Image (tube, rainbow, N blue to C red):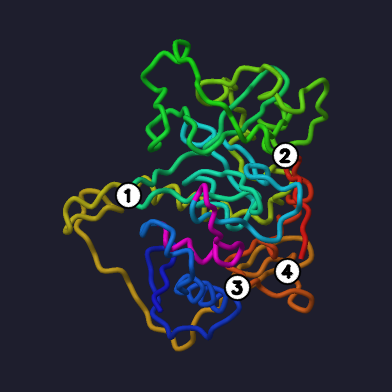
Amino acid sequence: MLSLGSAQTAEVSPMRQADAWVAWNQSRDSVFAQTGPSRRHLPPALAIFGSDLDSHGRWVYSVDLGYVWTPLRVGVEWAPYRVGKWCWIGGDYVWVSYDSWGWVPYHYGRWSYAANVGWCWIPPAMNAFYWGPGYVAWIGTSSFVSWSLWPGEIYYGRGYYGPFSVNTANINIHTIKGTNFYLNAYVGNGVTVVGRETFLTGRPERLVNAPANPFREGFRPAIGRPDIKPVRATALPVPTRIVSEWMLPPKEVTQRAARVEHRPTAANRDVSVFRPGQRVASMPTRRVEHPPKAVIQRAHPGSAHRELGQSPAFNSRTAKPSNQGGSTSDLPFRSRDRQHPLNTRKETD
């Protein structure tokens, strides 16, 4: 194993024995390698995510929609685009799901509601799959924000996001007359309404005089994302009060990562990128007989160090890593599912 030091030095040592961190990664590799039913319904580029869908849902056939995926172990009041947070990323509001399976279903394809099935996800076509920040329609006012959308209806976004989408980046949105019917608004829990402060920061806020369903009460949906200026907290996937400071990467790690990120490109293999103008030199390397210990020396409440891949909130005597396709049930910030104001899910086993 090659270990690089902070002072331009390196060590070559035997591989260390497998620990909980290595075992967890190996278990994830085996999960990704499994071939389940999802691979038959997903475009090849998205097949790698099939294990998450197989572990947390099932595929059913709908006469109107074809094969659709529906999640398991969700409450009767669960609905898409509720367990998570809208974050300001790359100049747009992007949905960051707290569901462990949420990457593909919330950024590809569309959500619908089918009789005898409930909420279900319609995968994108094999030859027309486009990533999107979150396929919803918006209603935004000075006091609340609401969203909903039905598959087959037009999605307005700043960019081209595939069939049934309109790029609003280079057009006058005030001249567009929407033609959507927003059929999801007529389904139970098909519309989400939160306070403006909750939308921006993720902090709970009591709604006063807000309609239960703006899409059915005469409010005009916006063409494109809501015209709401983000704040600093809008860029954070999880409210800062949930993530303790000691859980974040050490400052020296993030600072060094920033330096490496801005390192110039190696245009000439004989010229050093660390010392511009000088020729490359061999890095001093020494051999050691024993592998390095996988311990992070971090000061945090209750302990002086912890092993890689194990959080202080994780008790090996009372819990064990999940083998259900990458569940976040063992992460220390799982409490957000109970605290987040957008979460209406009731877990059932």
Residue at mark 3 to residue at mark 4: CA–CA distance? 16 Å
Eye-nearest disc, 3 or 4: 4
N-term-proximal mark, 4 vs 1: 1
Residue 211, image x, y percentages: 76, 23
For label 2, the residue is 188
Q: Foreground: 2 or 272?
A: 2
Eye-nearest disc, 4 or 2: 2
Query: In which quadrant of the rendered view does residue 172 lie?
Result: top left
Residue at mark 4 to residue at mark 1: CA–CA distance? 43 Å
Q: Residue 314 carries which label?
A: 4
Q: Which amino acid does label 3 sit on?
A: Val
Q: How many marks?
A: 4
Residue 39, image x, y percentages: 43, 65
Q: Is residue 112 magenta?
A: no
Would you place residue 27 above or below residue 329 in this image?
below
For label 1, the residue is 127
Q: Residues within 10 Å of mark 1 (few under 14, many from 20)?
A: few
Would you place residue 336 above or below residue 9 in this image?
above
Task: Work out which residue is located at the far bottom of the displayed protein and give it.
Answer: 289
Give the magenta-colored segment's residue range. 46-65
Eye-nearest disc, 4 or 1: 1
Q: Residue at x 52, y 37 (%)?
A: 135
Q: Which amino acid does label 2 sit on?
A: Gly
Residue at mark 3 to residue at mark 1: CA–CA distance? 46 Å
For label 3, the residue is 295
Q: What residue type is labelled 1?
A: Asn
- Left or right of 242, for residue 111: left
Q: Does the magenta stretch include residue 52?
A: yes
Q: What element carries label 4?
A: loop
Q: What residue type is labelled 4?
A: Phe
